[in-house]
Image: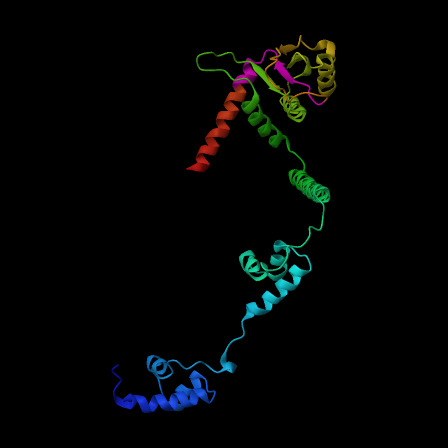
């Protein structure tokens, strides 16, 4: 092997001195400073085959973790519990404790299911509380609704849910159908704001024929403050025995259709209001 020239020309003599210092317990840095070696490659060649002194070796941090992991495993801890406690990987834990006997299960299958169910119940309860807080905060964010805000809300609500004329079929009728009682109440408040008198309103229930039709009519009549006898004949949806219905039970009331008589002018105004909203939205997008 060729050796360096210059101050490293006497390589073998330099190596003897370096090895002697290494065996005396000096670190690489100490040897480098003592022999004035500023080339790491030369220093590596000088100390080739010489192990470092014990005091220079860094302690292996995993030795301590390994011992802790084994102790916890002997106490019956699972891999997941040990991982959370020590912050190390499952693969490392598996290597460290695989020679130890598998701990006996802490719970029977029935107990585990009960614990899981209890945990799910607590989780759902916390989620319900969070939803309630979110909704209550949102209600406060709305505050008092001004007339103009109700007006704009009603225009958008009608255009989303109400009947609309087609270019090829201009009916110009104001008909609104929905199953949500809150939506119906907002719509009626909007009609009141527009000055549409209640004697111009007609009501009809649209519901599945297998439901309690009379109860549904009473429900909607109470909601809109009208006599059930004033309602038009309900529209019944035929029952399909092959269909599994989900809209059943006491909470199912079908839909309510609200019709405004002599509504052609109002319909055209609604159409114009909506066009104005769209035009302003388009301008903001440019």
199 up-or-down from 15: above or below: above
Specify the segment rendered in magenta: 251-268
> Residue at 74% across / 19% down in the picture?
222
Tell me: 284 left or right of 74: left
143 shown above or below 203: below
Which residue is at a point 57% across and 69% down the rendered structure image?
A: 63
- Residue at coordinates 59% horizontally, 65% vertically from top-left? 66
The residue furthest top is 233
**Residue 8, image quadrant:** bottom left
Give x and y (percent) for residue 243. Answer: 59, 17
Residue 202: name its quadrant.
top right
Judging depth in this view, the residue of 213 and 140 nearest the camera is 213
Q: Is residue 103 above or below residue 172?
A: below
In the rendered image, the quadrant that contains the N terminus is bottom left
Viewer-side residue, 218 vs 275: 218
- Give yes or no for residue 132 being in the magenta stretch: no
Q: From the viewer's perspective, is residue 86 above or below residue 150?
A: below
Q: Nearer the viewer, residue 75 or 167?
A: 75
In the picture, which quadrant includes the C terminus? top left
- Residue 258 is situated, as x and y percent measured from the top left of the image, at 63, 16
């Amino acid at each position: 092997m060729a050796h360096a020239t210059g101050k490293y020309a006497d390589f073998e003599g330099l190596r003897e001195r370096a090895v002697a210092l290494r065996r005396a317990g000096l670190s690489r840095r100490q040897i480098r400073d003592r022999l004035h070696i500023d080339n790491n490659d030369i220093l590596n060649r000088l100390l080739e085959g010489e192990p470092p002194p014990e005091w220079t070796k860094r302690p292996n941090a995993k030795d301590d973790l390994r011992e802790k992991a084994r102790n916890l495993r002997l106490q019956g801890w699972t891999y997941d519990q040990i991982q959370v406690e020590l912050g190390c990987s499952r693969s490392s834990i598996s290597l460290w404790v695989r020679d130890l006997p598998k701990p006996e299960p802490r719970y029977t299958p029935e107990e585990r299911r009960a614990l899981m169910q209890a945990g799910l119940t607590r989780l759902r309860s916390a989620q319900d509380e969070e939803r309630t807080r979110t909704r209550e905060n949102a209600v406060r964010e709305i505050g008092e609704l001004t007339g103009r805000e109700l007006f704009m809300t009603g225009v958008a609500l009608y255009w989303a849910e109400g009947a609309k004329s087609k270019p090829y079929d201009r009916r110009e009728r104001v008909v609104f159908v929905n199953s949500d009682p809150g939506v119906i109440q907002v719509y009626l408040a909007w009609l009141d704001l527009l000055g549409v008198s209640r004697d111009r309103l007609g009501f009809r229930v649209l519901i599945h024929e297998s439901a309690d039709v009379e109860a549904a009519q009473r429900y909607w009549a109470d909601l809109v403050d009208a006599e059930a006898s004033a309602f038009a004949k309900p529209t019944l949806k035929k029952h399909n025995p092959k269909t599994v219905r989900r809209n059943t039970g006491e909470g199912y009331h079908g839909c309510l259709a609200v019709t405004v008589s002599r509504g052609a002018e109002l319909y055209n105004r609604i159409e114009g209001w909506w066009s104005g909203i769209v035009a302003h939205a388009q301008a903001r997008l440019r």
